């Protein structure tokens, strides 16, 4: 009998297989940033979040906003495997008529709680969701996953101020700290490090974890749940392209399509889909 | 002395009536609660008021989050801070998902920005909002119309933008006039020499010009186009079929607003001569509202001349 961490680790591996396969078949997409957040998404959708795939708009459900919307292949894979829509939809990513848009779309994909992809906006939207839950007396949590690069957007800091002011204990933000953005290393493009003290200075509850360690992800969420008087940030150290060795350290995989040979190489490392 | 009544107070009054009936109605402000005279709402419904600070992008995105969970947020501040600073949030997170957020833009128009100067005179708002698919765009004539328009956009599901004024807004309708979203309103019809399409409080000037023209033997039809989107194309085409000439009068850049909307209908449906009266693609300056309108070519005499010009072109075509 596998324990919870082993089960989620296995799901994250399957999500990674889906990510590289669907981007290869679709001929477009962002593999590197999808792979860096696969473990967090697996933990959220297969353990943490109270959701009902048969009723995606259940008003009491926990919310998730993929602020770094370009990583949606990982989210689409999780939603498909969780039963929101057939797995066979995944290769239709980014094609005309597909329910899987190039970036998440609240109206086209069951399970997507908000349109996203224009960077920096997720925390503000999460604030709205958290405030609505409080006003309506609902107990759901709102989870936001942002990149580290997108924290360069000014709206992020507008949101940090407001979330603290309203003491939004049910708002939990993961920062997928893979240290890279479209044109290179975050520290070189426009450094916003260190991230954690900045959130702390804005009054947030902060934790720092290995974003590929399922046990640490689950523990951090539990700790964040216990903080009721302010919002939480979990700084997750991650690796862009995690799971596919030839993508690691090569930022061309921010947005690049694996060839058939490259796909096979990736699948050989990730193992079979069983 | 011109009678004035605050469109800002009217907004809050309309909102209060909505809030009383519907617990999902909430208000978002970005340090704009005094600007839009929201104190009565905040006093009555403190839990339903959300202050973002001076952070309009955050306010619009936050409103999107509120709406996605079943609330009906109104976000009210100066027109340009919604339509320009937070334009992308309006487009991507409210209009594209079709969320039920109502945007209220104060100081809409050069004259409503008046002595504040260009930073607070917003004469591009309607053009910007009109190019975004899925937003209802409304320019009520005066305070009583604002109050009705606020309730009218609440009855439809989906995004809406309402332009309001300075708080010292000329009254256009002395008596109660029912507001019908999406329909033009014929204000005066003395004949069919030309049609005058207009909106906002410059209607008062248009009606004066129509009287002067009538005394000179030029008979016009004056129509208020308060809903710029969706545009009442059918009624506009019908009027143009009868008058075969049109003048538009608006407190907005000549590009993008009512003049452009009517020009588009004319070009596609019924080619007739058109003269547009508005701010001619330049930046105005500070001044008293009526002075500004006169100075920048939106005076009664300018309207009269525009009609004469279009009637002449019609005769020679």
Image (cartoon, helix red, strand yellow):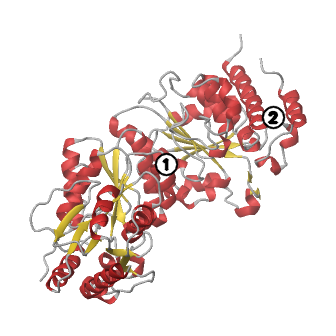
Residue B21 image point, x, y percent: 20, 42
* Residue B16 pos. (x, y %): 20, 52
Give the camera-side residue of A221 and A30: A30
Helix, strand or loop status at disc 1: loop
Between residues A213 and B232, which one lies in front from this camera angle? B232
Q: In which quarter of the image is residue B233?
A: bottom left
Of residue A150 and residue A171, the one placed in the foreground of this image is A150
Are the residues tagged 2 and 1 within 8 Å (C-beta)?
no
Query: What is the total number of numbered labels drawn onto the structure image?
Result: 2
Please tell me which residue is depicted at 33% across the width and 36% down the height of the picture.
A136
Subunit bearing disc 1: B
User: Which residue: 22% across, 54% down?
Assistant: B180
Residue A110 - label? none
- On the picture, is A138 further left or further right than B300? right
Indicate the secondary structure of the residue bearing disc 2: loop
Quick one: which residue is furthest to the front in this view? B316
Q: Name the residue under label 1.
A: B96
Pointer 1 local density, CA inside 10 Å: few below 14, some 14–19, many at least 20? some
Q: What is the C-alpha distance between the residues marked 2 and 1? A: 35 Å
Residue at the extreme top of the image, as rendered: A1
Q: In this view, does B246 lie to the left or right of A88?
A: left
Q: Is residue B234 left or right of residue A127?
A: left
Can see residue B169?
no
Q: Which is more toward the observer, B31 or B157? A: B157
Q: In this view, does B258 lie above or below A198?
A: below
Query: Measured from the top left, where is residue B186 in percent x and y?
Result: 20, 64
Q: Which of marks 2 and 1 is in front?
A: 1
Give the image location of residue A123, x and y in percent.
52, 48
Q: Circle 2 is placed at which residue position?
A: A243
Question: Can residue A208 be seen at all in this image of the molecule?
Answer: yes
Do the residues at pointers 2 and 1 share their chain? no
Check the image and report above or below for A88 versus A175.
above
């Amino acid at each position: 009998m596998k324990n919870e961490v082993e089960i989620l680790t296995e799901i994250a591996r399957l999500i990674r297989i889906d990510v590289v396969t669907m981007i290869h078949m679709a001929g477009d997409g962002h593999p590197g940033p999808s792979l860096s957040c696969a473990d967090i998404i697996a933990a959220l959708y297969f353990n943490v979040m109270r959701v009902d795939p048969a009723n995606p708009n259940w008003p009491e459900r926990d919310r998730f906003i993929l602020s770094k919307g370009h990583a949606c292949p990982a989210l689409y894979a999780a939603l498909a495997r969780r039963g929101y829509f057939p797995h066979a939809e995944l290769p239709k990513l980014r094609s005309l008529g597909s329910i899987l848009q190039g970036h998440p779309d609240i109206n086209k994909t069951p399970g997507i709680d908000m349109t996203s992809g224009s960077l920096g906006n997720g925390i503000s939207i999460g604030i709205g969701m958290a405030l609505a839950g409080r006003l309506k007396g609902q107990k759901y949590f709102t989870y936001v996953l942002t990149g580290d690069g997108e924290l360069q957007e000014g709206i992020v800091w507008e949101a940090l101020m407001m979330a603290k002011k309203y003491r939004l204990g049910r708002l939990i933000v993961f920062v997928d700290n893979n240290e890279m953005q479209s044109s290179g290393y975050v520290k070189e493009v426009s450094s916003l490090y260190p991230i954690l003290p900045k959130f702390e200075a804005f009054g947030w509850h902060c934790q720092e974890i290995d974003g590929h360690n399922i046990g640490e992800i689950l523990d951090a969420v539990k700790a964040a749940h216990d903080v009721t008087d302010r919002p939480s940030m979990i700084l997750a150290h991650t690796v862009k392209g995690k799971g596919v060795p030839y993508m690691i350290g090569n930022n061309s995989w921010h947005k690049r399509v694996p060839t058939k040979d490259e796909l096979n190489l990736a699948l050989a490392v990730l193992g079979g889909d069983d | 002395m011109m009678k004035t009544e605050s469109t800002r107070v009217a907004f809050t009054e309309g909102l209060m009536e909505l809030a009383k009936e519907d617990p999902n109605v909430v208000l978002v402000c970005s340090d704009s609660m005094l600007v839009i005279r929201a104190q009565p709402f905040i006093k009555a419904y403190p839990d339903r008021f959300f202050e973002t600070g001076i952070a309009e992008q955050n306010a619009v995105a936050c409103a999107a989050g509120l709406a996605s969970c079943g609330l009906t947020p109104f976000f009210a501040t100066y027109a340009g801070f919604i339509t320009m600073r937070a334009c992308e949030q309006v487009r991507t997170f409210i209009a594209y998902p079709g969320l039920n957020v109502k945007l209220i833009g104060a100081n809409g128009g050069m004259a409503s920005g008046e002595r504040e100067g260009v930073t607070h005179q917003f004469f591009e708002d309607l053009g910007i909002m009109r190019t975004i698919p899925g937003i209802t765009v409304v320019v009520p004539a005066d305070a009583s119309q604002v109050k009705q328009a606020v309730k009218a956009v609440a009855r439809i599901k989906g995004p809406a933008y309402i332009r309001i004024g300075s708080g010292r807004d000329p009254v256009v309708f002395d008596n109660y006039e029912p507001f019908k979203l999406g329909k033009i309103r014929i204000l005066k019809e003395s004949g069919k020499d030309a049609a005058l399409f207009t909106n906002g409080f410059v209607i008062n000037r248009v009606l004066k010009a129509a009287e002067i023209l009538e005394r000179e033997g030029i008979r016009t039809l004056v129509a208020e186009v308060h809903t710029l989107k969706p545009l009442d194309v059918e009624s506009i085409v019908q009027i143009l079929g009868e008058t075969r000439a049109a003048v538009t009068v608006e407190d907005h850049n000549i590009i993008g607003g009512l003049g452009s909307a009517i020009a588009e209908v004319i070009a596609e449906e019924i080619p007739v001569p058109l003269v547009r009266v508005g701010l001619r693609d330049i930046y105005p300056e500070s001044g008293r509202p009526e002075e500004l309108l006169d100075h920048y070519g939106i005076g009664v005499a300018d309207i009269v001349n525009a009609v004469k010009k279009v009637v002449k072109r019609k005769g020679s075509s």
